Image (cartoon, rainbow, N blue to C red):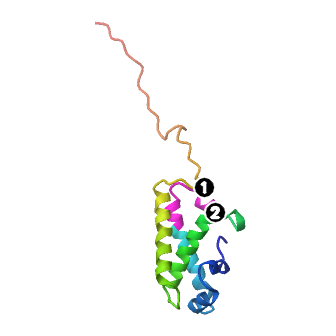
Amino acid sequence: MYLDIEELKTHAYDEEIGEIIREDETIALACIDMAIELASSKLMKHYDVDAIFKTEGSERNPLLLKIIKDIAIWELIGLSNPSIDYEDKKFRYQQAVDWLTAVYKGMPTSLTVKEQEDTSKASSFTYQSNPKRTNHY
């Protein structure tokens, strides 16, 4: 798993997350999945998202991990707002989406680049002509 619920504690207090999910971890997991899906949709144009989101622990890109947490927390606080600094979370969510959009538009990153397909192979069709004819009158 790319991101655990426990790791969201760097972006919101455990008590706040607990109040929102009310002991139903599937809510937080759904928010994490939505965040990963949003990031994947922005990154898949140039990057190997399968390889990126299969990484775990310290192998993960720290900036992308922060972005995923920001988006997941934003999705989570949409359910309830128990004493969370809403404006800060909104700002961080917008920063996360802006970064993903910039990457989509071509901003360089240290993420795993998608392998290019070899298009130099034979095409799906061929063409030829009849041998040249010489007419004598």
Q: Which residue is mark 1?
A: 110
The residue located at (59%, 53%) in the rendering is 113
Q: Quadrant of residue 23?
A: bottom right
Out of 116 and 93, give the one closest to the viewer.
93
Q: x, y percentage for residue 124?
A: 49, 41
The kind of secondary structure the magenta stretch mainly shows is helix
Q: Which residue is mark 2?
A: 61
How would you rate the neighbour count of disc 1 (Cα within 10 Å): few for under 14, some for 14-19, many for 20 or more? Answer: few
Q: Is residue 10 magenta?
A: no
The residue located at (58%, 74%) in the rendering is 69
The residue located at (51%, 80%) in the rendering is 75
**CB under 8 Å between callouts 2 and 1?**
yes
Residue type at numbered disc 2: Asn
As drawn, the label of residue 79 is none
Specify the segment rendered in magenta.
Answer: 39-52
Q: Is tag 2's residue or tag 1's residue first in the polypeptide sequence?
A: 2
Q: x, y percentage for residue 97?
A: 47, 68
